[in-house]
């Protein structure tokens, strides 16, 4: 599944391997791939 995540007027792509991920899986992928890029831990 391909998603676009928007924060502070910037958009980043997020790829999730599952076709229908749960909310927990989405949170995990978001945390692993984008939060470090944004300066969050």
Image (cartoon, rainbow, N blue to C red):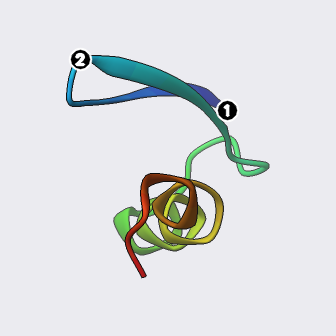
Question: Counting other residues with Cα less than 10 Å from the Cα at mark 1, is it few (<14), some (14-19), or many (20 or more)?
Answer: few
In this view, 21 is above or below 5: below
Q: Residue 8: percent from the left, percent from the top?
A: 20, 29
- Cβ–Cβ under 8 Å for marks 2 and 1: no
Residue beneath the point at 43% across and 64% down: 39
Q: CA distance from mark 2 to mark 1?
A: 22 Å
Q: For the residues carrying marks 2 and 1, which lies nearer the camera in this image? A: 2
Q: Residue 12: percent from the left, percent from the top?
A: 53, 27
Q: Quadrant of the N terminus?
A: top right
Image-quadrant location for residue 23: bottom left
Question: Counting other residues with Cα less than 10 Å from the Cα at mark 2, is it few (<14), some (14-19), or many (20 or more)?
Answer: few
Residue at far bottom of view: 41
Residue at disc 2, secondary structure: loop
In the drawing, does residue 24 fall left or right of residue 34?
left
Please name whichever residue, 41 or 6, is drawn nearer the observer in this view of the structure: 41
Q: Quadrant of the C terminus?
A: bottom left
Q: Residue 22: percent from the left, percent from the top?
A: 45, 63
Count of all numbered marks drawn on residues in the image: 2
Q: Residue under circle 1? A: 1
Which mark is on residue 37?
none
Q: Residue under circle 2? A: 9
Residue at far front of view: 39
Please name whichever residue, 14 or 7, is drawn nearer the observer in this view of the structure: 7
Residue beneath the point at 57% across and 46% down: 20
In the drawing, does residue 35 fall left or right of residue 6?
right
Residue at disc 1, secondary structure: loop
């Amino acid at each position: 599944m391909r998603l676009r995540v928007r924060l502070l007027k910037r958009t980043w792509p997020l790829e999730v391997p599952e076709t229908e991920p749960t909310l927990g899986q989405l949170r995990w992928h978001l945390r692993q791939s984008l939060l470090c890029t944004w300066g969050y831990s």
